[in-house]
Image (spheres, rainbow, N blue to C red):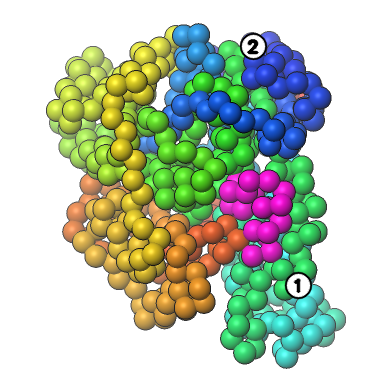
């Protein structure tokens, strides 16, 4: 089989105006970025209304280095629905340069289920992430400018400023830094650091805003730190929100591209789910729901992260409805890894390890049922999967009374997703939906953490140092106890220990820190060794990337 780049290279893309027509978007509502990508005007986004499509949320079992193919499944399912004559669109997040050049590589799907133009989407795309970086760092510069001119008796207590800087790259040496050294002209010396742009509250705000007015208000509500007399200081106090919104005025518009089969794809926003809320923008999803009969949207990582945050954060905005059905992506490779086998062994038939690893998938099935959502388990097929293993997997799903479909969109495109599409349609039409939030907003923050830890992760209890508990209580006392929580933890385990594979039980979830994202509208709870600025692996994906003399990019996988 050809590799992803060769497959994409052999496809003749359609002009973006032709893709837009499939969704009823007129050319005057497109801001074109070349022939094959465009931004959709806010006028079109806000004028569209009335009809509401069905929302299909894609999640997965706990991810492994073997890969689960969640994005590939999302794209392939949308193509398959279109093949069945349905008006469908896929709504995805934008790739971050951090993982593209780090461990993961590209994030535009794979095989015959890709979005295009793949290289442009994986790299700078339409500049949205750069705009978020600029807006975030403008605010940081204005904070330090106040310190420089006002000194220690001004608006900020320099020891209690929480706003850092960001960049869209994995760079561990920037996690903790000292700035302002070198004399009075360099500002006030203090400790700070960098996060990755995908973890920026500005990114979350961009993805949760209903329009420019809401965007500006949320930016003004960003908590920056405390004043010398202990009062919270916000971005509006230093008059930063207007300039930040100006930098984001184009970034807030959703982006339109296409799948390799010439179907529409809306890609907008890029928050990670292990350290942020992990879903594309509500504007993109809302627009898609108004223009199509079926919308496939992907949440980050597994049900314990992306799906939980979609339900408890994104749906609570009121701008996106609860999913009509979920697709829970699994692979036999991942099951074997969770069943105790090494990465080198997962290509070999091993039904015993697969059965043992199924415990992990069982928990994710349980999680979707906790939210009252109908779902289909999609087995993303790999060439090394054997008939005996597939047959056993199907029986295990039947034992759980779970709908099952084999997905082979990587190798066959839409044709390989028809069974999945039919099963999804049947679930929408026949299965009972009884959506419920995991917790009410009026309970204490500590109780919210405990509910997520016990019900979704399977923890026995939560624990934290006294200073962390006091920080959470301070957030509550400052008037933000009614916000939902966004737990930042490893994606590689249901627990906060990335080495605890399978379905860990009776463990303690260690809370290590907390921060207020008052503009985005949630409280971030950090657990275990999670880092908001990742580092590159020993052999980064960047080593494979190159550009030919003809300007063709190679090595993006």
- Which stretch did the figure color magenta? 203-221
The residue indicated by pointer 1 is 238
* Residue at image location 60% in from the left, 78% down from the top: 232
Question: Dot 2 surroundings within 10 Å: few (below 14), some, or many (20 or more)?
Answer: few
In the rendered view of the protein, which quadrant contains the C terminus?
top right
Q: Is residue 19 above or below residue 238?
A: above
Residue farthest right in this picture: 185
Q: Secondary structure at mark 1?
A: helix
Q: Is residue 1 visible?
A: no
The residue indicated by pointer 2 is 11
Q: Is residue 147 above or below residue 399?
A: below
Q: Is residue 343 left or right of residue 197?
A: left
Residue 283 drawn at (x, y percent): 62, 39
* Residue at image location 19% in from the left, 54% down from the top: 505
Q: Secondary structure at mark 2?
A: loop
Query: CA separation, marks 1 and 2?
Result: 50 Å
Question: Dot 1 surroundings within 10 Å: few (below 14), some, or many (20 or more)?
Answer: some
């Amino acid at each position: 089989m050809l590799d992803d780049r060769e497959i994409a290279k052999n496809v003749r893309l359609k002009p973006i105006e032709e893709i837009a027509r499939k969704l009823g978007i007129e050319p005057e509502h497109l801001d074109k970025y070349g022939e094959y990508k465009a931004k959709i005007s806010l006028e079109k986004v806000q004028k569209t209304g009335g009809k509401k499509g069905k929302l299909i949320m894609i999640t997965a079992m706990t991810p492994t280095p073997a890969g689960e193919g969640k994005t590939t499944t999302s794209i392939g399912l949308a193509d398959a629905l279109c093949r069945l004559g349905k008006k469908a669109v896929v709504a995805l997040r934008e790739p971050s340069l951090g993982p593209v050049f780090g461990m993961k590589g590209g994030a535009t799907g794979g095989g015959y289920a890709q979005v295009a133009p793949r290289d442009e989407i994986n790299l700078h795309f339409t500049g949205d992430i750069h705009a978020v970086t600029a807006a975030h760092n403008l605010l940081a510069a204005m904070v330090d400018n106040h310190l420089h001119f006002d000194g220690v008796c001004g608006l900020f207590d320099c020891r209690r400023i929480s706003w850092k800087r960001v960049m869209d790259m994995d760079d561990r040496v920037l996690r903790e830094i000292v700035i302002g050294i070198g004399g009075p002209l360099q500002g006030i010396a203090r400790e700070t650091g960098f996060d990755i742009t995908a973890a920026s509250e500005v990114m979350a705000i961009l993805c949760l805003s209903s329009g420019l007015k809401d965007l500006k208000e949320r930016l003004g509500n960003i908590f920056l730190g405390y004043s010398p007399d202990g009062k919270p200081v916000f971005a509006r106090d230093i008059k930063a929100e207007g300039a930040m919104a100006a930098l984001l005025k184009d970034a807030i518009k959703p982006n339109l591209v296409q799948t390799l089969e010439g179907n529409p794809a809306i890609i907008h926003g890029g928050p990670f789910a292990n350290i942020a809320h992990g879903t594309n923008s509500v504007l993109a999803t809302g627009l898609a729901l108004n223009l199509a009969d079926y919308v496939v949207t992907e949440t980050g990582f597994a049900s314990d992260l992306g799906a939980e945050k979609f339900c408890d954060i994104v749906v609570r905005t009121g701008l996106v409805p609860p999913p009509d059905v979920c697709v829970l992506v699994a692979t036999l490779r991942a099951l074997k890894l969770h069943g105790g086998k090494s990465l080198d062994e997962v290509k070999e038939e091993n039904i015993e390890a697969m059965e043992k690893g199924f415990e992990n998938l069982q928990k994710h099935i349980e999680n979707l049922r906790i939210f009252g959502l109908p779902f289909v388990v999609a087995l993303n097929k790999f060439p090394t999967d054997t008939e005996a293993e597939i047959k056993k997997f199907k029986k295990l799903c039947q034992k759980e009374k779970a709908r099952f479909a084999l997905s082979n969109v990587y190798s066959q495109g839409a044709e390989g997703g028809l069974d999945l599409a039919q099963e999804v349609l049947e679930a929408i039409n026949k299965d009972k939906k009884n959506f419920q939030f995991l917790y009410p907003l009026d309970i204490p923050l500590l109780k919210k953490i405990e509910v997520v830890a016990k019900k979704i992760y399977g923890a026995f209890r939560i624990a934290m140092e006294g200073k962390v508990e006091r920080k959470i209580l301070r957030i509550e006392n400052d008037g933000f106890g009614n916000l939902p929580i966004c737990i930042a933890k490893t994606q590689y385990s249901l627990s906060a220990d990335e080495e605890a594979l399978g379905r860990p039980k009776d463990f303690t979830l260690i809370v290590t820190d907390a921060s207020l994202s008052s503009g985005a509208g949630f409280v971030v709870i950090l657990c275990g060794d999670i880092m908001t600025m990742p580092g590159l692996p020993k052999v980064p994906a960047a080593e494979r990337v190159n550009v030919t003399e003809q300007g063709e990019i190679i090595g993006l996988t």
